[in-house]
Amino acid sequence: MASLKEVKTRINSVQSTRKITSAMKMVASAKLHKAQGAIEHMLPYQRQLNKILRNFLSGDLSIESPYMSEREVKRVAIVLFSSNSSLCGAFNANVIKMFLHTVGEYRKLGQDNILIYPIGRKVEEAVKKMGFFPKGSYQQLSDKPTYQEASALAEHLMELFVSKEVDRVELIYHHFKSMGVQELVREKYLPIDLTYIEQEQEEEKQAVNDYIVEPSVEQFIADLIPTVLCQKIFTAAVDSNASEHAARTLAMQVATDNANELIQDLTKQYNKGRQQAITNELLDIIGGSMK
């Protein structure tokens, strides 16, 4: 059985850990609140883009775009979104697990034909350990997503696809649904499938397509698609960032709760040991006085 001094030392140690996890939870919660605000400000713009695109596509137009070109996949690019730091539960581990599954599907192409774009230090380190050479470092985009950096990456990916240096681009990231739910998503980024546009609320489906477009609808759509693709990368970055803070908030909450339970158990153990030590001393005193 541990001595009273050892138990007291453990209690102090766990209390110190609890202070750290509690503080980290508060910081992550504040960052999550900020990230949620960014999502709320971004969603109206994204929905309006999708609404405009959906309205034009509903007119049975024959749209041709280099970003829609379906061809045999000989070279693929994979964009992974993770965090720069740990202590966020299984957040990064799930991304890496999905990445391994995806690479397994494209293993027949050869490692040189699988281009990896890691967003975040954790997944960047994991990719290097697996023997891949990341195509750049995007740790800033993971920590503080900006549209400028996201659009620069999107334009680079679009250039690779149009020049036929890659035949498909996929994204792996966490979609933020709520504080307790972050859904891991793997989706095709390029070629874009314009027949699938996320449907909004029922009243938005009845919008009137009364637009005057110059110089032509085809040219407008050709200019709109790159904007939608740039917005998609930014959306994935913001989604992943919010999911990271939500996962860390929950992880630190669980750690704090576990610390509280452990402190209670150790305190009981300490009190029992102290009571037993006092009882033994009393028995020794009584025994000595009776001699």
Image (cartoon, grey):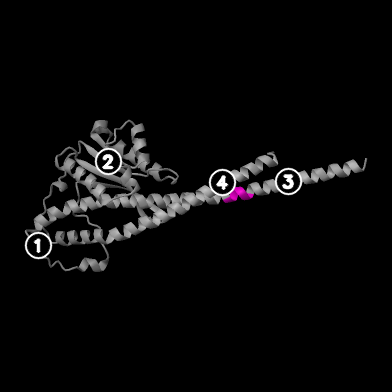
Sequence-wise, which precedes: disc 2 or disc 3?
2
Give, as a single range, the part of the protein colored magenta: 260-264
The spot of residue 100 in percent (x, y) is: 34, 38
Q: Which residue has dot 1 on it?
A: 213
> Rounded to the nearest whole Å, what is the CA distance between mark 1 and mark 4?
64 Å
Name the residue: 28% across, 53% down: 235
Magenta segment includes 132: no
Identify the mark nearer the N-term, 2 or 1.
2
Q: Badge 2: how crowded within 10 Å, few (<14), some, or many (20+)?
A: many
**Sooner in the amino-acid sequence: mark 4 or mark 2:** 4
Q: Are marks 2 and 1 in contact (CB under 8 Å)?
A: no
Q: Which of the 4 image quarters holds residue 36?
A: bottom left
| Label 3 element class | helix
Amino acid type of disc 3? Answer: Arg
Residue for point 34% across, 42% down: 120
Q: Residue furthest left?
A: 215
Disc 2 versus disc 3: distance between alpha carbons? Answer: 60 Å
Number of numbered callouts drawn: 4
Name the residue beneath numbered marker 3.
274
